Amino acid sequence: MTSTPSPATTDVSDAHPEAQVCDPLFQSFGGRTAFSGPIATLKVFEDNSLVRAAVEQPGEGRVLVVDGGGSLRCALVGGNLAVLAAENGWAGVVVNGAVRDVDEIDAQPIGVRALAAHPRRSEKGMHSGQIGIPVIFAGVVFREGEWVCADRDGIVVLPQAPAS
């Protein structure tokens, strides 16, 4: 899958003062420092079963936004899921939580933003989750189908992709 270059978040922010801008909480992982696309949302807590199910599906250039409740007690995305996400055409993943297998994630042609890295895996079947609902973290409401853009300057959300 070839991807179109993502616009700079600074340019998006300048052109759209109404854009939501995430609080600067996230670290950058993955082989792509910049990514953008329509949002797909998940709300989970310390169980990445729904994350795996999502990245196993065609991403079609979307960005998976995972509200993990900000938990730093285990990782919600690791190397295996980064491989699946990249192979299935996801543009990126934004995690309100932790990741692991950082070197493996960095080797994939995908952008990942997360609060931190943590070596512990999540517990499967421990918690339920929700798919496709608005999730709120880092001062932003992420809604399914809206548009997110991330680069080294931050993360910006608009109701739809800006005109090229």
Image (tube, rainbow, N blue to C red):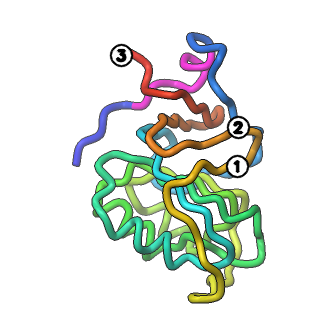
Query: Dot 2, crowdedness within 10 Å: few (<14), some or many (≥20)?
Result: some
Query: Dot 1, crowdedness within 10 Å: few (<14), some or many (≥20)?
Result: many
Q: Residue at x 68, y 84 (%)?
A: 120
User: Does the magenta segment cover residue 152?
Assistant: no
Q: Where residue 70 sits in the image (x, y, percent)?
A: 76, 62
Q: Residue at x 58, y 89 (%)?
A: 125
**Mark 1 against mark 2, which lies toward the viewer?**
2
Q: Earlier in the sequence, mark 3 or mark 2?
A: 2
Q: Horizontal placement of 154 versus 144: left or right?
A: right
Quadrant where the C terminus lies? top left
Q: Do residues under tags 3 and 1 come within 8 Å of each other at their CB atoms? A: no
**Mark 3 against mark 1, which lies toward the viewer?**
3
Q: Kindly identify the amino acid type of the residue bearing the numbered disc 2.
A: Cys
Disc 1 to disc 2, how far (Cα)?
Answer: 9 Å
Circle 1 sits on which residue? Answer: 26
Q: Do residues under tags 1 and 2 come within 8 Å of each other at their CB atoms? A: yes
Query: Dot 3, crowdedness within 10 Å: few (<14), some or many (≥20)?
Result: few
Q: Kindly identify the amino acid type of the residue bearing the numbered disc 3.
A: Ser
Which segment did they paint magenta? 6-13
Q: Horizontal placement of 4 versus 98: left or right?
A: left
Disc 3 to disc 1, how far (Cα)?
Answer: 27 Å
Q: Main secondary structure of the magenta part?
A: helix
Circle 3 sits on which residue? Answer: 164
